[in-house]
């Protein structure tokens, strides 16, 4: 075997070794590509799940605030009777009307007590005050209406005659002011409540 043949054989051996190295690198690269592809598919599925979750949350209705607890009715038979009256009423009622519906004597004491009970129910949110009224009481007095300090003289009344200079000085003394007895009429005796059933919380 000549030296040229040995050189060709060595080259072929080197080519085979290089081919095996390239084949091994290609196999490793394919394995890495397979792993990266699997990882890419996994990330794609995770992103899709996130998009679906976000879309589902956006389509959900807004959360409603928790409902307030129902107001507690005072433990007294009178309040139960009052609520029974409002349960059958189709319009706001005044304290006097509530007394009439409960077959109570229409007396100031009963009306005031009923008004206090209605106010207590309104403070608890069971009833709603819808109107305030003021009624005259002819039995009580009111302050007199102030009169102007100087009243204009009527045009059809002649002016007073001038005082003569030789008149007695005693006749020039001013007369004491006349006291006006103002007759005081009726005044507002207070305000009367009108009540209606409170709407149920939604």
Image (spheres, rainbow, N blue to C red):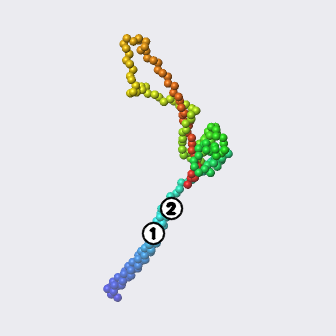
Q: How many marks?
A: 2
The numbered mark at residue 78 is: none
Q: Residue at x 39, y 78 (%)?
A: 22
Find residue 121 and report its horizontal and vertical position in percent: 60, 45
Say whether residue 17 is left or right of residue 135.
left
Q: Which residue is mark 1?
A: 44
Residue 98 rendering spot, x and y as whole percentages = 62, 45
Residue 113 visible in the current orientation: no
Q: Residue 32 vs residue 123: left or right?
A: left
Decide which of 188, 35 is in the foreground and name it: 188
Residue drawn at the location 41% of the way across and 11% of the way down: 168
Q: Give the x, y percent position of residue 77.
A: 68, 45
Mark 2 or mark 1, which is nearer to you? 2
Compared to residue 159, the image places residue 122 above or below, namely below
Which residue is pictured at 62% across the width and 40% down the height? Answer: 111
The residue wearing badge 2 is: 60
Q: Is residue 78 above or below residue 24?
A: above
Front residue of 34 and 54: 54
Picture coordinates of residue 122, whole percent (x, y)? 58, 45
Other residues around mark 2 within 10 Å, as few (<14) / some (14–19) / many (≥20): few
Distance from Cα at disc 2 to Cα at disc 1:
25 Å
Q: Quadrant of the C terminus?
A: bottom right
Q: Is 68 placed above or below 187 here?
A: below
| Residue found at x 53% / y 32% | 185
């Amino acid at each position: 075997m000549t030296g040229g043949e040995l050189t060709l054989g060595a080259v072929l051996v080197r080519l085979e070794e290089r081919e095996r190295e390239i084949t091994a690198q290609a196999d490793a690269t394919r394995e890495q590509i397979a792993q990266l592809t699997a990882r890419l598919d996994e990330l794609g599925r995770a992103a899709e799940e996130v998009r679906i979750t976000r879309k589902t949350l956006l389509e959900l209705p807004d959360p409603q605030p928790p409902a307030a607890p129902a107001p507690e009715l005072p433990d007294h038979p009178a309040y139960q009777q009052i609520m029974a009256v409002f349960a059958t009423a189709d319009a706001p009622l005044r304290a006097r009307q509530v007394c009439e519906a409960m077959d109570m004597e229409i007396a100031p004491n009963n009306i005031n007590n009923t008004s206090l009970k209605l106010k207590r129910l309104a403070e608890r949110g069971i009833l709603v005050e819808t109107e305030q009224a003021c009624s005259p009481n002819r039995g009580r007095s009111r302050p007199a209406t102030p009169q102007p300090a100087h009243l204009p003289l009527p045009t059809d009344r002649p002016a007073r005659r001038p005082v003569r200079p030789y008149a007695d000085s005693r006749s020039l003394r001013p007369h004491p002011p006349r006291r006006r007895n103002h007759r005081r009429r009726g005044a507002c005796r207070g305000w009367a409540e009108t009540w209606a059933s409170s709407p149920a919380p939604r």
